[in-house]
Image: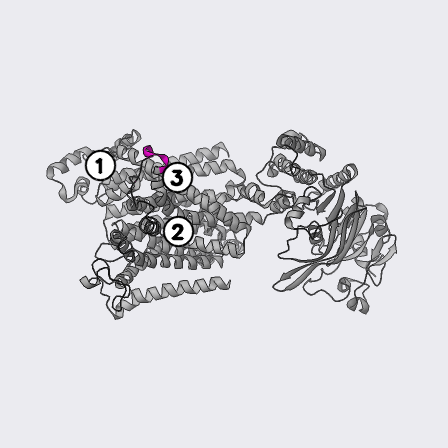
Amino acid sequence: MTLLSIRDLVVEFPTPAGVVRAVDHVSLELGFGERLGVVGESGSGKSVLARTAMGLTRKGPARISGEVVIDGRSILGLSERGRRALWGREVAMVFQDPLSALHPITPIGAQIAEAVRRDPSVKKEQAAKRAVELLEIVGIPQAARRAKSRAHELSGGMRQRVAIAMAVAGRPKLLFADEPTTALDVTVQARILDLFDELCREFGIGIVMVSHDLGVVGRHTDHVAVMYAGRIAERGPVKAVFARPSMRYTSALMAAIPSHRAERQTLPKPIPGSPPNLLAPPPGCRFAPRCAFATDRCGTEQPTLTELSGGHEYACWHPGQEAVR
Amino acid sequence: MRRLKVVDSLSLTWLGVLFLAAVILPLVIAFDTETMSSAQRLAGPSADYWLGGDNYGRDLLARALAGARVSLGIGFGSVAIAALIGVPLGMLAGYLRGAVDAVISFVVDVVLAFPGLVLALALASFLGASIQNVMIAIIVPMTPVFARLAKAQTMAVSGREYVEASQVIGTPTRSIVWRDVLPNILPPILAYAMVNVGTAILIEGGLSFLGMGVPPDQPSWGSMINQGRVFISEDPRLVAVPSVFMLLTILGLNLLGDRFLSGNDKAGVR
Amino acid sequence: MTARFVVLRLLRLVAVLLVVSALCFLSLNLLPGDPARAILGESGTPESVAALQQELGLDVPMGERYITWLGGILQGDFGRSYANRLPVADIILQRAPVTIELILLSQLIALAVAIPLATVAAVKRGTAVDRGISSLVFLAVSVPSFVLAFVLIWVFAIKLGLYPANGFIPISAGLGQNLGSLLLPSLALAAGPAALYQRVLRADLAETYGQEFMNVARAKGVSPLRMAVRHAFRPSLLGLTTSLGVVVGVLIGSSVIIENLFSLPGLGSILATSVSGRDYVVVQGVVLVAATAFVVINAVVDLVYGLIDPRLRKARVTRRAGAVPVA
């Protein structure tokens, strides 16, 4: 049974300067209780992908085609009202910056209770109680007292815990997390990621974690999809992708992960150049201008996804683990 | 955007035509605002009197244009003087801070403690009705408004790199204020001044309407409305003509001011 | 909200009020020539001038006179009107309720109109609906209250005959009747403030709608109505509350004209009457009361807002500067 199925999704934003195709024919699948990491640089379309998959991208400014099915329901075919019925109950999202994501004035307990009360059978007092329980679940000490606090009175890590509590309050089956640790201190990041693992394990929530950090995603997800300039560059089980990165961009990302292991005392290697201008992307492989292995073919012909082993696919004409010659 | 431009040019056209007709035209031909004609009493528009006659049979259009001259003169004149006094004070307070700021801000607070029109009315009553006193009655409550705005703008600008750079290299305060601060705070102040001309015209209208403004022998929109109010059920035109002149003028000034603002930094101005 | 902040505010408030009272006192004493003669004007007989000189205590030094005068004010002695010899305090007490009711009603109408219009415009920002509302608002902000009053009188009283053009029905004759007699004047007064509120609130709401917590609310499945009311509204009140106090000043000023126009027996109409009748003691008393009320209301608005949203107190100081319409 698949929890989330994205098929041939295209998201375009018409701008005065031309059409920006932020997501370009992306297909992905996720099973119940599984964790998928979507990795890419900023501007790779990963956040747009997540927001569109959840149905949040507004039809006005965006042109969307393809299909997104969450637990058997096609979300793109639904009206705003129809989607709203799913939001917070079937599918929820944790945002990047917890300070701006939490309401500045409403106490955090009330914000969580509001999410709990998306289930109309829950009474007001029950919701308040449940909010405190949720705060305990996400590891906030003295939850009953903290429930009355406002967002600006909490630390960054606490805020993100609150945001996570709010997201899981409606017992969703699927949780999108958009760069959930980027705005946090390094020391706090690991604990928040552990919390996601715990939620996934204990409540069977499927998680799509969007991140620019392949290292983070590698340790906390089952599957990984690498995005570059709106396209899937490589995807597959984390172990397979980490063991044998094939698309050269993935290899470059791997090389850029700082290593703490003594046997790999190599410095992380930054990727030269910058991501392409999406108003005028390169005609062939989008990564070709920055790739050390690019040939004429890469400049003209788009590579398609090729299966390497069970579920591990890459889009590259010259696959290999090395990022530099 | 295009819609806004249409509105802008309409505003400009109205104010331009009004200026030409009220200020330039009288240099060429004299308006007859005083001749009373029984035939024209409350008469509708005609070839002679384009907007008809008032309750004394005087030419309504000529009087409205004469009123425009008074209103525009008082409006622009008092705002210019208020800005010339208020802006330097505000810049001093905003740039020097400290005791200077404390004193200026306190004076500003005191003057702004009086509701604008009430202060204007009180001043007009103590000073007596004349164009000059009406202007004083408008300038006094308006000056601190400019001071406050200039102070906020100056404080915002003073923190920017180019000003700090000038301070570091030892440029004299006078030339920093003159060359770095003033040009940057001027656009929002001009926009605000435009809107305040409308406000000044409004206060003048209010004072004249209450009989405390421009002396009765000089027609003003406010006093015309006041004279016409008795006849409102017989002939609303007497009130409507000066009202429409006043409304369009204030509207035009507000629109232009807003347009000017939206093209500039909005900090401190709302 | 620290205690220090409150105390400093209060001290400043008292200082401003002292200077305001001194100015009101001086205004009478700095009239050109002899105050008693100026007050009585051409009609003053030598005897009445002498009597007034004694009543004003002109033989005493000015500083001393101010202290005595201020002491009297604090005990409710504002002097006597020259038109009818009534105590000014009685006149003010008798007329203040009408003005207060008029201003409250206008504020309520203005807010009742502005809040929904601002919300709709902010939700539909950038659309024809938003532009339509903003055009209307621009018109409203540019209409002098007395011009609007004439339009209302002409339409409702003269053309439709629905309404007496003027006169005040006291509350003792029934609340409905009383409110009815204040309806047209309140509408005339409310239009400008409503427009100002709409502009300020719409701008703040639009800013709020651009913030991430609104996306979060949407992703939580919160309905658009609940988003507007429970999520967007409170964080967007900065500009509105700031203008609330400012608008009281505008309303006090405009009520002078509107009360005069609709023959309402409030403070505004007595101010207008006293000004043209040169009844300076009444002018002095009413102006002092109006300024005091205005200053105190603004201070209260300030403090209350600090309590509602302590997060924004700092931002408020910079943003309110320069945003004071005069009338």
Left or right side of C289 for A102: right
What is the three-letter code of the residue carrying label 2?
Answer: Phe
Residue B146 disc label? 2
Left or right side of B270 for B34: left
Can residue B214 be seen at all in this image of the molecule? yes
Q: In the rendered structure, does residue C172 fall within the stretch colored magenta?
A: yes
In percent of width and height, residue B120 lies at 30, 47
Left or right side of A294 for B184: left
The residue drawn where x is 69% and y is 60% is A21
What is the three-letter code of the residue carrying label 1?
Answer: Ser
Chain of the residue where label 1 is placed in the rendered structure: C
Q: Quadrant of residue C105?
A: top left
The residue drawn where x is 81% and y is 46% is A1
Vertical placement of residue B165 versus C42, above or below: below
What is the three-letter code of the residue carrying label 3?
Answer: Leu
Q: Secondary structure at mark 2?
A: helix
Circle 1/circle 3 CB separation < 8 Å: no
Furthest residue in direction left, as rendered: C46
Distance between mark 1 and mark 2 Cα atoms: 36 Å
Q: Quadrant of residue B38?
A: bottom left
